Amino acid sequence: MPRPPLASIDLAALRHNLAIARQRAGQSALWAVIKADAYGHGMLDVLPALQAADGFAVARLEEAVKLRKADPDKPILLFEPLSSLSDFQQAAALRVQVCCSHIEQIALLQQLSAHAKLQVWLKLDSGMHRLGITPAQLPQARQKLLQCKAVQSLTLMTHFSSADDRNSPATQAQTDCLLSLNHPPFERISLSNSAALLGWPAIGHEQARPGIMLYGASPLIHVSAAALNLQAVMTFSSRLLAVNQLKKGDPVGYGASWVCPQDMPVGVIAAGYADGYPRHAPSGTPVWLNGAKVPLIGRVSMDLISVDLRSQAHAVSGDKVELWGKNLPADEIAQAAETIAYDLFCGVSARVPRVYRDA
Ligand SMILES: Cc1ncc(COP(=O)(O)O)c(C=O)c1O
């Protein structure tokens, strides 16, 4: 067993969360989003638990190359808008489905021969204003793509900006925008991320693309993962390195930003921002120790954090701690550190060993 800190990845929980996505998507195809090394969980290691997905979606061509080597058959969708002919040729050779998000890409696709046989997802900017063809450009883009010898099929897709907020009008507006342009109907359409699957049941979930829900964090604001019946996949744990008996007035950590209000025990944990613990987590952020929460105190440093042990007088060095996971939802830590669980998961650094468990 590697020394802590480590990230234990529960493959049974991943399968469970995929089954929830499957229930929500009904008969629709489900693309498991495994970009960014499966949101920090280890792309190749989680593949066996995601075999029930209809395809995999990644963000970078390099990820698609790695994935195709590991799985010769599964459909792969690449979100990154490719910008050179050779990249398109490579995607075609790997049977990777590609996104077309800019008019300029069409000129490259027009140069590909019929052998290339590409399945293309035409990305519509329905309101995110990040990537995508504008509604005004769409009819012409569609026509040009259909005339490309290499283009075998066309899916119309868009990505929601605010589906995490069920009170936001943006999701319905983006859906209406896409549906108003789906005439004559594209072969396939694709709208839903995790938040849409779980929070917007009235939206058609054709070709759904869930990511974060698979890893057991909630995609919806003000709704916990437990309320959505999602299970934590990653448990980020470490151990107490030392228990120090400090005096009233003793400062703790860099900048002396926290000062002991009384004589008290302080625990030092082997985890810091170089492991992926959020640097901006404030004093009070919970850490799970011996079946209860204890508060972080002082600044997070590169390799260490400190905790207030006044409620855990019997804690000793070597005790296991959970930074987030089964007992302490990543969403709770993310909220304390003013970030999102996506950021926490992706931020767990390469020096933290991933250990895989299956029920
Ligand atoms: C185009 C696209 N579709 C789907 C997803 C998955 O989103 P989520 O992880 O919120 O389910 C992402 C993630 O950012 C994305 O960029």
Image (spheres, rainbow, N blue to C red):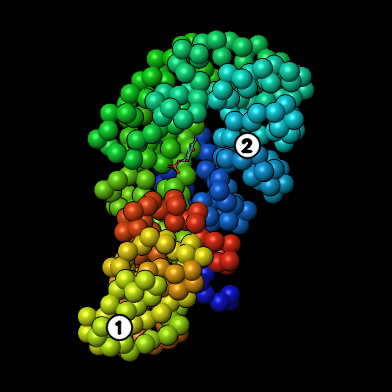
Q: Nearer the viewer, residue 134 or 115?
A: 134
- For marks 1 and 2, give the CA distance: 58 Å
Could you say where residue 181 lies in the image, as x and y percent from the top left?
A: 44, 14
Q: Is residue 69 visible?
A: yes
Q: Which mark is residue 75?
A: 2
The quadrant in which residue 161 appears is top left
Residue 241 located left or right of residue 118: left
Question: Tag 1: residue type?
Answer: Asp
Report the residue at 26% width, 80% height from top: 260
Q: Which sits in the foreground, 304 or 189?
A: 304
Q: Secondary structure at mark 1?
A: loop
Mark 1 lies on residue:
250
* Label total for image: 2
What kind of residue is marked 2?
Pro
| Residue 353 as seen in the image, left or right of residue 172 | right
Please name whichever residue, 255 or 120, is drawn nearer the observer in this view of the structure.
255
Spot occupied by residue 316 in the image (x, y as percentages of width and height): 39, 88
The relative height of residue 51 versus residue 279 in the rendered view (above or below) is above
Q: Quadrant of residue 75?
A: top right
User: In the rendered view, would you say 132 is above or below 234?
Assistant: above
**Label 2 element class:** loop
Q: Position of residue 127 (x, y in %)?
A: 39, 25
Q: Are marks 1 and 2 in contact (CB under 8 Å)?
A: no
Which residue is at 32% across, 44% downward?
220
Kindly identify which numbered label has been placed on residue 165: none
Does the beta carbon at disc 2 come under 8 Å from ligand 1? no
* Horizontal arrangement in the rendering, residue 85 relative to residue 228 (left or right): right
Mark closer to the observer (1, 2) = 1
